[in-house]
Amino acid sequence: MVEKVFALAKELREGKYVLIDDIPCKVVQIESSKPGKHGSAKMRVTAIGIFEGQKKTLLSPGDADIDVPIIERKNVMILSVSGNNAQVMDQQSSEVYDIEVPAELLSAAAPGKEAELLEAMGRKKMERIK
């Protein structure tokens, strides 16, 4: 299974995803310098890790290849909630697994409700409850 693809650094936009140190991150800010006589334009990409929430910075020439994670969004049905974990069933594959419920979504998590998961690099995170 392919977990990442390549793209040019100058094609990045805020709100898109990038891999920094093998951590999938969402881009929050891009600064770029003008090309000079000693090379191409440089880019400083600031991003937040989608699983850990840590801030990462990527320095790269504008025409360099960068890694972009393949992000999948899945709809799941919540089967049960125990503490801050929920047992969910993937609605496409009928696979059942446990996932941690973020603190801000814990009050809305209830059996029978649908939730949206974000999956990248073999990890899953609950994004919202419908």
Image: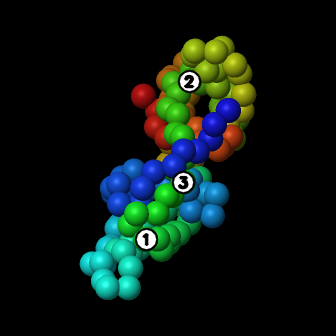
Q: Residue at x 57, y 21 (%)?
A: 77
The residue mark sitting in front, 1 or 3, is 1
Distance between mark 3 and mark 2 Cα atoms: 28 Å
When asked about the image quadrant of residue 36, the answer is bottom left
Is 43 left or right of 2, judged from the image as shown?
left
Amino acid identity at mark 1: Pro
Residue bearing mark 3: 67
Residue bearing mark 2: 76
Q: Residue at x 46, y 37 (%)?
A: 128
Is 33 left or right of 115, judged from the image as shown?
left
Question: How many numbered marks appear?
Answer: 3
Question: Alpha-carbon neighbours of circle 2 within 10 Å: few (<14), some, or many (≥20)?
Answer: many
Q: Nearer the viewer, residue 3 or 39?
A: 39
Sequence order check, earlier mark of 1 and 3: 1
Quadrant that contains the N terminus: top right
The residue mark sitting in front, 1 or 2, is 1
Under tag 2, what secondary structure? strand
Residue 98, x across and y down, in percent: 72, 32
